[in-house]
Amino acid sequence: MKAYCTSRLVSKRRITREVKVGNIGVGELNPIRIQSMTTTLTMDVEATIRQSRALVEAGCEIVRITAPNVKSAKALGEISNRLKNDKINVPLVADIHFLPSAAMEAVEHVEKVRVNPGNYADKKKFKVIEYSDDEYNLELERLHDSFSPLVKRCKELGRSIRIGTNHGSLSDRIMNRFGDSPLGMVESALEFIRIAESYSFHDIILSMKASNPKVMIQAYRLLVAKMEEEDMHYPLHLGVTEAGDGEDGRIKSTIGIGSLLVDGLGDTIRVSLTEDPVYEIPVARALAEKATKLWNNKSSVDLQMEEAVDPFTFTRRKIQSIELNQKIKICSTLPQKVFLKTATQGNITNSIDQLSALTSNPAKVDTPIEGWMVALKDINDISELSKTPKTVEAQKIPLIAEVGESLNKDPQLLNELLSLPNTLIVVLEWHQIGKIGLQNWSSWAIKNNVPLALGISAEDLAQNASSFIQKELPPIILFTQSKDSNSHTVGAYRLLIAVQNSMGLKYPTWLRINEKSFIEQAPGFLNDLLEASFLAGSLLSDGFGDILSIESVENPEKSLSLAYNVLQGAGARISKTEYVACPSCGRTLFDLQKTTQTIRKTTEHLKGVKIAVMGCIVNGPGEMADADFGYVGGAPGKVNLYIGKDCVEYHVKETEAVSRLINLIKEEGKWAEPKVTTE
């Protein structure tokens, strides 16, 4: 299979054909376009216009509006005309599910029509059917008859089409032949592309959305590889569907979208949040700016190395295990560990006080500190650290000692720390110690049973291979740091692992996310969140990374929480309840934001339980198939409750639905009473 991107080591944009959405060019050399979707009822023309105007004022360049039926599709005409009369020339997109008749009406009024290939001409019934080739071809003919009128009308009117595949709504035909898989998602889109191309229609934009970022990433990669094989160059619309709200929704969206942008993929993006859509725009703009900065950077790598990675299938990298203490073991069969660096201001005593406050908090039982990082500048810091309070010693948290230049010439200076009951890991930089330093530190570390964490570039590792391919080395953990703010941190880690693989080394990898690794320096927690999700999320989705530390947040409690939330967003480590929630639109049958918050408040203590909250049936049963429980709008004022993809209660009154959901969780043995904490 062809490569899905120009380089996995350096960010280079994939150049596509340009597709016009009204007056906005998407793809080719155009900027990454920002879009969102209204949450109002389409028939409420006034409300939809108000929200569209607010989105445009926030920086949205393309506005999508649902058209669940022909009446709503007709209303798009009035919405479009009134916006234009107000000098708001934003392109509109009609979002179509199930009804080709609605699409045929909508195309008369808007600049683009989005169709979901899983339900445009199919109904999902989860039926198991063995199709012969002839039967399958008959299904494709039926599909052609349903879709071709829209293609021909779009060509006549100069409209564009988004073929928007959703993981949760693949047709039974696709599911039976290709499975519930990224390949099934791609083949679903290709069926529609081939129909469009049979009429020489090429104004197509593609999307491969899923609520699971890893599935989404694999599907887009596979789509591009398949298109390369068939000489297709269509632009990509990126988004993680049903990402949820708050910090979790932003993290999950950034992991999926950012991982693809790093590899040069993506021409227009939508960050789907279960919030007012105006709040989606700043996140999308920030992601676009970070990607553009990467793409405009002319950096290259001196070392070319073949990666032993299948980018279309997730596999965790196998590593050499390291046991830090009885509680903490670093290995590829256990979740990634989280190290914490306390605030950089102040002295060692202040750092110890911060650590004590965090470890004494009973609410942190599911998000423990598994390594405490402290910078040692001189011998005075060592002396102060050796007087660690008993409350910290009792935690037996591994001590991660970052050794400054004044200390790294003589390992014996750290002997005083060996008396502490905490496991000790010494952090060194290759460019400071070199070959001789590694030999000295290795001898000391072996004698005292101390693992070393070494910051080293892939180039230095390759050039000094003989220093690492030998028996007399202690347990080693590797990390790498960007040489400057424009470097491609994800590529640096990928290259470091590729060099290790070529040498037969299986050292654990420590993902250190800090100002040195940031794509862009900007103040505020949102930037830290996006950078951590962008960089760590990309690597975790590749199966890389055994330790994670986020070191940029001055508030260590936020830093710790963010690390665990990134791991959860990437599906690497579950530390709390998981929510799959759609962003709401005109099809939603209840107040999605309010209901999601109500369900969250009632269930957020259920670690490891996955709950889906869906406004309607469009993607519900499929997208939440791997959720434990589902809450789905079935009719106005009525909710359907699911266990997995099976509906177990139909048309429950909305006023009773949350309590019935809790009863279901109890009946399935997954309920636990929330812990009551006392001050």
Image: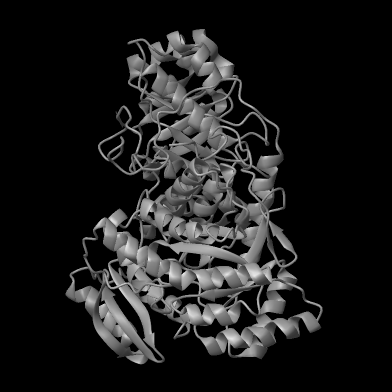
Examine the rendered structure and indicate whether residue 518 appears above or below residue 443: below
Residue at image point 52% right, 12% down: 463
Q: Quadrant of residue 535?
A: top right
Question: In the image shown, does 86 or 366 lie closer to the viewer?
Answer: 86
Residue 14 spot, x, y in % from top left = 61, 43
Residue sitting at x 77%, y 73%: 89
Q: Is residue 245 above or below residue 373?
A: below
Asked whether 378 or 466 is in front, the reply is 466
Query: Residue at the location (48% across, 57% down)?
Result: 194
Q: Position of residue 555 (x, y in %)?
A: 56, 52
In the foreground, 664 or 215: 215
Q: Quadrant of residue 37?
A: bottom right
Using residue 239 as the reference point, say whether residue 497 is left or right of it.
left
Q: Quadrant of the C terminus?
A: bottom left
Q: Which one is in front, 83 or 409?
A: 83
Horizontal relation, residue 88 to residue 411: left or right: right
* Residue found 50% across the figure and 82% down from its top: 101
* Quadrant of the rendering where the N terminus is positioned: top left
From the viewer's perspective, is residue 451 above or below residue 586? above
The number of callouts visible is 0
Q: Position of residue 623 (x, y in %)?
A: 37, 66
Can residue 626 be seen in this snapshot? no
In the picture provided, is 130 more to the left or to the right than 561? left
Residue 167 visible in the displayed image: yes
Q: In x, y percent, where is residue 124?
A: 32, 72
Q: How is the image coloured?
A: one colour
